[in-house]
Image: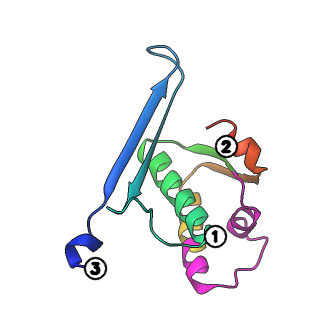
Amino acid sequence: MHLYSQHSRILEFDGASKGNPGPAGAGAVLRFKDQSKGMATNNLAEYLSLILGLKYALNIGIKHICIKGDLKLVCMQVQGLWKINQEHLAVLCREARDLKDLFMSFQINHVLRVAVHGNI
């Protein structure tokens, strides 16, 4: 892979609202030119999505946050309730905890996948 390819991505985005204005949502995905999103474990992908969400929330001025995630491992590790056995996940967990400390209040809960994706 050429250096240029390693630093190039396709950004796909979409937003929608019910009414104009009205309740709205937005999302984005970064893909490689072959349309893949890259290779990672589920645990890594979940941590990265949590960190991205926390950074965005802080960037727009959110002070109090309640997080719902469908991977119990991440929810429990961020709360310090479960041991972290892999160093690369420990690094991400520390980053998530550091971000957590920037909120006035922070709550993270494990929910079933249906509960998370049913409202997205």
Marks 2 and 1 sit apart, C-alpha to C-alpha, by 17 Å
Which numbered disc, 3 or 2, marks the residue closer to the eye? Answer: 3
Q: Which residue is mark 1?
A: 43
Residue type pointed to by label 1: Asn
Give the residue type at disc 2. His
Give the tally of numbered discs. 3
Q: Which disc is residue 1 wearing?
A: 3
Secondary structure under tag 1 reads helix
Name the foreground residue: 89 vs 28: 28
Q: Which residue is mark 2?
A: 117
Asked if residue 101 can be seen in this view, the reply is no
Q: Is residue 110 above or below residue 34?
A: above
* Element assignment for label 3: loop
Q: Residue at x 75, y 42 (%)?
A: 115
Q: Is residue 31 above or below residue 17?
A: below
Judged left or right of residue 61, residue 63 is: right
Q: Which residues are magenta?
A: 69-92
Is residue 39 rendered magenta in the image? no
